[in-house]
Image (cartoon, helix red, strand yellow):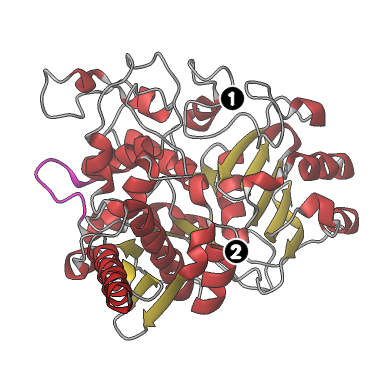
Amino acid sequence: MARKLAIGAAAVVIVGAGATLALAVRPPELLRVGANYGAKIVCSNVFVAERDAQAVLADDVQAPGHPVLKYLSVRVDQQRKIVRTQFLGFIGDGLAVYRPGTGCAVAPDGDVARAAQYQFNPLKIWAPSPNVPWPTGSQPETEKAVQALLEQQALAGPGMRGIAVIHNGRLIAQRYGEGFSAATPLLGWSMAKTVSAALVGMQIGDGKLSLQQNGFWPDKGDPRSSITLAQLMAMSSGLQFNEGYGDVSDVTRMLYLEPDMAGYSAGQPLAQAPGSVWNYSSGTTLLLSRIWQRAAAGDGHDAASAAVLSLPHDRLFAPLGMSSALIEADARGNLVGSSYMYATTHDWARFGQFLLQDGVWQGKRMLPSGFVDAMRQPAPASRGQYGQGQLWRWGPSGDTPEGQNPDLRFQLPADTYWMEGHDGQSIAVVPSRQLVVVRLGLTPHRLLYQPQALLAAVLKAVE
């Protein structure tokens, strides 16, 4: 009996060791997604936002995320600017690398050297003076009644990290969460999509793109070649793409398992006739990034060259004085205009004000006349909720039934439109009231926070 027990115990050990080895050598894709997600978030917050790695792991990755993330550990190589993560110390092998000008990239294939080559040395954008009023400087012109509203926790929302209220082009109120300040670059998640639309608009203004242009797939017989730029801008391409974040989906695979995100998106099959169905898709915005990068580069030139990668910095952020702004590139030089832009609350507000001013800044037109208005027009297949230029016509849904406009019960002006991002990022623009309200934080959707209440209160106060 003792011998049988010993043999059985040995078998259990062998099987367990084999299973452990299998997990280490070929971990499930969900664990790889989690490990690369953790590496990417920590990398960006350490090397872009200058935050503590362990605090970022605990607060930004583990606290709001999947329970399995609690078993994730992180190592930061400050000299090589590489971040590695693993589950239980040996599973997952998450890997991300920081590059000047293009921030952090996941390297799911392990090729750090290739990912690191997509960079540029940004020209210095001088930080706004604290002694000059916003937007040229950073000095607020505080209105006490509005500032008092921001101090109400129910209006600011759980996990708030930064709020700025701009009225008639003046910064009239601001608030920051504990550990954050006006100098902290914050991730906008899908708010970056609207910035990508502006970069497309700049190429249209240069005469290098047009909204009715198609043929973005090399084979003319490919049915996807009929997809127009306008249909991509309106999230109505017809391409298959699953935006679910709860498992290994198209969007999580693209962001955390694919070194060439735009290539992965371009490989998606056509699921519906172009223009017939609205489907919110980060993959669509990666395609837009690749399209405008190629247009800017010109035929036969490298769309991931330093000259192209620096274009957002040189032609958009520098003129607006957005000294903190950074769009990160993937491991093949595609700017991740769907998801990965960091900027301070003040700089996100500058972009919102730029939209409110129809793409004009300090008297200089930077977007084609009427382009922002066209962005705001309803995408035909979206039932009114989404615009034709990578922005929302409705604010965050909260607990509003699907298909219903959540803004109605807040009685917001009819011309209100939104930039929105994962975990509670939003910028509301109200042209008729000359108002921009930025709200950033770490506020998972399950908390059902809606910034419309804050916007409605601010509107009442400024009127």
Residue 217 visible in the shown view:
yes
Q: Residue 311 appears at what percent x and percent y?
A: 33, 54
Nearer to me, 2 or 405: 2
Nearer to me, 441 or 327: 441
Name the amino acid type tagged 2.
Ala
- Name the residue located 33 percent from the left edge and 17 percent from the top edge: 274
State the image quarter where residue 313 is shown.
bottom left
Nearer to me, 65 or 3: 3
Q: Residues within 10 Å of mark 2 (few under 14, many from 20)?
A: few
Q: Quadrant of the N terminus?
A: bottom left
Q: CA distance from mark 2 to mark 1?
A: 31 Å
Q: Residue 146 appears at what percent x and percent y?
A: 85, 53
Name the amino acid type tagged 1.
Gln
The residue that mark 2 highlights is 63
The residue that mark 1 highlights is 385
Vertical side of 376 occupied by 11: above or below: below
Mark toward the viewer: 2 or 1: 2
- Span colored in magenta: 297-304
Vertical side of 458 occupied by 22: above or below: below
Vertical side of 427 occupied by 345: above or below: below
Residue 32 within the segment the image draws in magenta: no
Please identify the dominant SS of the magenta region.
loop
- Name the residue located 69 percent from the left edge and 59 percent from the top edge: 159
**Label 2: which secondary element:** loop
246 relative to 442 in the view: left or right: left
The answer to which of marks 2 and 1 sits earlier in the sequence is 2
* 2 and 1 marks in contact (CB < 8 Å): no
Q: Residue 131 appears at what percent x and percent y?
A: 69, 73
Residue 127 visible in the shown view:
no
Vertical side of 116 occupied by 216: above or below: above
Q: Quadrant of the C terminus?
A: top right
Q: Residues within 10 Å of mark 1 (few under 14, many from 20)?
A: many
